[in-house]
Image: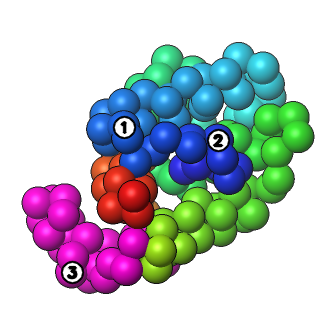
Amino acid sequence: MPMLRGEFPDAGEQSPEELLTAYGTVLAETVETVGVEEIVAETGLDQATVTAFADGDIADRTLDEAVAVLATGPNRPDADALQAEAQDILLMGMTTAVMDVESLASGIDDELEPKEIQQKIEGRYPVTLAEYALLHSHIEGEKR
């Protein structure tokens, strides 16, 4: 969920938990700027979901929901562009780190299966923000 390239430049130096907190800060700031009601109206997300983003309770929220929230912010691309960028950051990171889904699964102590990782990165299966932070942190850390 880097959301715009360079927004989390030290992702590889942060634990997945620290990265998830950083995502939460950006999302909460977006909700504060735009407003819960406006985000509900623009995205179709329910108020409880948007309030969870405002409160930083995001670990079980999905990347799809997060990009919908971020897309409401000023000077942000639409949700589809943000989703594509978030997926691209993981795929390009894996390429740069010369890593396949099997080595990535091993690197995250098999918390996710290789096939599951591939489906989530490709956007064929929902990925939670906690899972995204886990993958993002590990991939960026391997690029060094």
The answer to whether residue 4 shows anywhere in this view is yes
Q: Earlier in the sequence, mark 3 or mark 1?
A: 1
Residue 140: x, y in percent? 42, 56
Is residue 141 positioned above or below 107 on the image?
Answer: above
Describe residue 101's horizontal placement relative to residue 123 as left or right: left
> In front: 41, or 56?
56
Quadrant location of the C terminus in the rendered image: bottom left
Q: Which residues are magenta?
A: 97-122
- Per the image, label 1 sits on a secondary structure element best described as loop
Q: CA distance from mark 3 to mark 2?
A: 28 Å
Q: CA distance from mark 3 to mark 1?
A: 22 Å
How many numbered marks have been drawn onto this rendered protein structure? Answer: 3
> In front: 115, or 49?
115
Is residue 90 positioned above or below 51 on the image?
Answer: below
Describe residue 86's horizontal placement relative to residue 106 as left or right: right
Residue 133: x, y in percent? 39, 47
The label number, if any, that marks residue 102 in the structure image: 3
Describe residue 88's horizontal placement relative to residue 38 as left or right: left
Q: CA distance from mark 1 to mark 2?
A: 13 Å
Disc 3 residue crowd, few under 14, some 14–19, many 20+, Cα 10 Å: some
The label number, if any, that marks residue 97 in the structure image: none
Report which residue position mark 2 lands on: 7
